[in-house]
Amino acid sequence: MNAGPPAVETSMVELEIMDRIAAAKIRLRFDKSVVRLINSLKVALAEVVPEGQAVIFTVTAPIKRRAKTAAALEILVRSGLPSGEVRNTIQDNHVRVRRVTNVAAHMPKVVGLVHNPESDSDLVLTLAESQLLGRN
């Protein structure tokens, strides 16, 4: 029996990021497919992201072909992100990946957020980055 990826705990920082996004009237998605995608990428990429850095990714919902989307995102991050951000379309989902530097050691290294297509992904990334850098 395949239980899927191991459960990954959501940190207080991630909960604060989600609260800030909700306060901006942006609805994030948390269905089973979303949780599996985020958890699998957190596990796969935690050791890849260097100390003092974090990776934030956004994906538009609904997620089509979750495993292929996760594999493509993992390859993208493992191949080395340029400073700044990458925008792409993977399996018909709009994806943005932002590398953040000067992140405190206690902050999560990988933050994944899934939102509806009409949501402002730039604001989602900006709010998450601000929280990771301690700019409340």
Image (cartoon, rainbow, N blue to C red):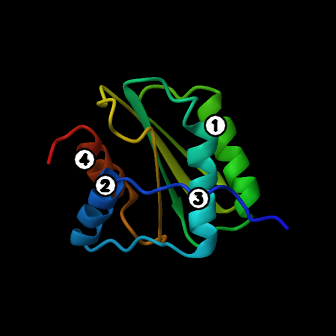
Question: What residue would you read off at disc 2?
Answer: 12
> Which secondary structure lies at badge 2?
helix
Residue under the image location 56 percent in, 76 percent down: 31
Kind of residue sitting beneath label 4: Gln
Residue topped by disc 4: 131
Q: Measured from the top left, where is residue 16 in percent x and y? A: 26, 58
Which of the marked residues, 1 or 2, is nearer the chain's N terminus?
2
- Which of these two is toward me, 32 or 127? 32
Residues at badges 1 and 4 in contact (C-beta under 8 Å)?
A: no
Q: Residue at coordinates 72% horizontally, 47% vertically from top-left?
A: 71
Between the residue at mark 2 and the residue at mark 4, the CA separation in whole angstroms equals: 11 Å
Determine whether the residue tagged by mark 1 lies in a helix, strand or loop: helix
Marks 1 and 2: CB-CB under 8 Å? no
Residue 51 versus residue 72 in the image, above or below: above
Residue bearing mark 3: 7
Q: Nearer the viewer, mark 2 or mark 4?
A: 2
Which mark, by number, is residue 76? 1
- What's the CA distance linking mark 3 and mark 1? 23 Å
